[in-house]
Image (cartoon, rainbow, N blue to C red):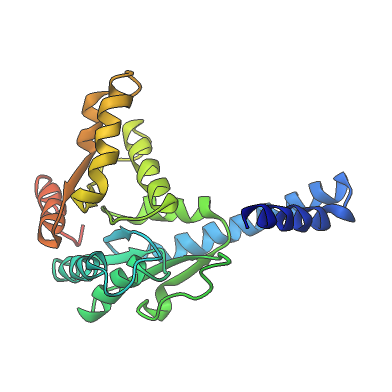
Amino acid sequence: MSENINIEEEHRIRQAFKDKNWSDIKSEDSWVIFKVMSEFVQGFEKLAKIGPCVTIYGSARTKEENPYYQIAVEIASRLVRQGYGVITGGGPGIMEAGNKGARLEGGKSVGLKIYLPFESESNIYIDPDKLISFDYFFVRKVMFMKYSQGFIVMPGGFGTLDELFEAMTLIQTKKIGRFPIILVGKSYWTGLIEWIKDVMITEKNIHPEDLLLISMVDSAQEAVAIIDDFYAKYLLQPNF
């Protein structure tokens, strides 16, 4: 089956480039710059107005009956009660749960949607004026980093890991200021953390203190408390 998929994908790529020469390809690349610029401008203009928010990440494949879905709803609801808005990737699964929790409490519910073949629709719990769609992952990632006061990372796949390690890298290298990064689900994340300790730290590829950038919890109450405690140290409230 996978071999057939690879053959079909190769055929699609060949067809896309069949009638194009190198000058055509370079010309199209130049126009991409304007599309990228428009996505940055749209994101900056809309998100600059929303106030303090916390981003909730996690798998688009998580079903409503999954306990992690329910925890994400509770986390979002608690965040809103503490004065924060909620940002998600705008899709189904954990993202839907985050927006749902925010909506149930009457809080700001933001969705940063990416166009994907297997995620065609945004979830129904996003505020209509706070749904932004992107073609480019890297533009969307900038928006998450720039306008989030914390990351709640639920169990997820490659995309979730991508956002997690992007945040850790930028904080570690002091490209952005530190903010709370909370992994929810100890049974899900412990194997990864142990591998980081046993391999990455042992090989001296990161410093042991780098693991202090993240916290690991099992409950919504613990997750939100970490965010509140972090900002309380600076005498800041959600209206900062």
In the depicted view, which residue is nearer to us: 5 or 198? 5
Which residue appears farthest toward the front when viewing the image?
Answer: 1
Q: Quadrant of the C terminus?
A: bottom left
**Number of marks drawn:** 0
Q: Quadrant of the N terminus?
A: bottom right
Name above or below for residue 111 compared with residue 166.
Answer: below
Q: Residue 204: x, y in percent?
A: 32, 18
**Residue occupying the point 22% across, 54% down:** 184
Indicate left or right for 217 with 138 as reference: left
**Residue occupying the point 37% across, 41% down:** 165
Indicate left or right for 30 with 63 as reference: right
**Residue occupying the point 40% across, 66% down:** 61
In the depicted view, which residue is nearer to us: 106 or 161? 161
Q: Quadrant of residue 96?
A: bottom left
Q: Residue 199: x, y in percent?
A: 32, 25
Q: Residue 84: x, y in percent?
A: 22, 65
Q: Residue 103: x, y in percent?
A: 27, 79
Indicate left or right for 83 with 87 as reference: left
